[in-house]
Image (tube, rainbow, N blue to C red):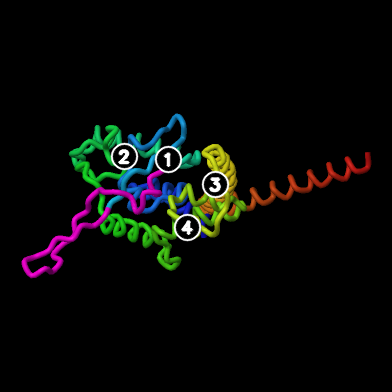
Amino acid sequence: MRTKFLEALNKDEANFIKPLCICLMFSGLRIGEALALKWENVDFANKTLKVEQAITQEPKFDSDGKVTSRVTIVGDTKTTCSVREIPIADIVVETLKQWREKQILRQNTNKEVTGDLISRTSFIFANDDGSVRSYSGTKKIFDRFKKRNDLKKYHIGFHGLRHTFSNMLFEMNENPKVIQQLLGHRDVKTTITVYNSVDSEYVRQTTEKFNEKVKEEQMLIDQNIREEVIEERKEKLVKDMTDEEFDDMLQKLMEERQERKRKKEKDFEM
């Protein structure tokens, strides 16, 4: 399922969904934390991400005390332990770099962009007017993405993407205390059980091992995409051929196969 989802992200880059999901899947962020991220929170040189705030929904009431609307505001994280600086995998670093380049291009060429999208204090996943995105608006765009890519049947949600990160770390048999620190849990029991405390270097080493795991999975995805492209080209090539050309191609393939077989037999005799 992970592979299928990543393939869809690589093929469908129409909006901010790819960089957002990569942050959730490979950094373990909560959706509210990701939407509140600013460019100043990313240290590309040292490959770290600082989580300081999160979005919340503030209700508005009428004179009878009924909720009339909800306004998205940027406030504190879920708990004090959720404030954290974490090492991030190469896939997150590269994806955010690519997204920043796209935002620079959009700001310079798209008249619909009226806000500052690329300053240090700009939200990474801002609306075109520079305002913070709401959870509900983001979910609608994500739902459309899933529908476009035939992923609705898998019931993928933002929280599930965060769980993907922890699951991958558990697959690596990592210390739950490290996972607790990366996820920003208040209590290690939330993660799994109590372990000895760990220092930042241990967390960095875990991220490096995680990096290698991600690269291995990415190589498989890239290979699958290459094979799909090759098959598409083959189908197109055959489709455009006349019967005579197709027969000639088959004849050449058979001759080449026979030649390879003869060479093998000769090498065996020698």
Mark sitting on residue 121: none
Q: Which numbered marker is on residue 197?
A: 3
In the image, what residue type sits under mark 2?
Lys
On screen, residue 69 above or below 179:
below
Find the magenta span and give its range.
56-84
Gap between marks 2 and 4 measured at Cα: 23 Å
196, 14: nearer the viewer: 196
Q: Cα distance, mark 3 to mark 2?
A: 29 Å
Give the structural element (helix, strand or loop) at label 3.
loop
Task: Identify the residue under disc 2.
Answer: 38
* Residue 57 within the segment the image draws in magenta: yes
User: Which numbered dot is residue 163?
Assistant: 4
The residue where tag 1 is placed is 85
Above-or-below relation of 59 to 245: below
Is residue 44 shown to the viewer in this render?
Answer: yes
- Tag 4: amino acid: His
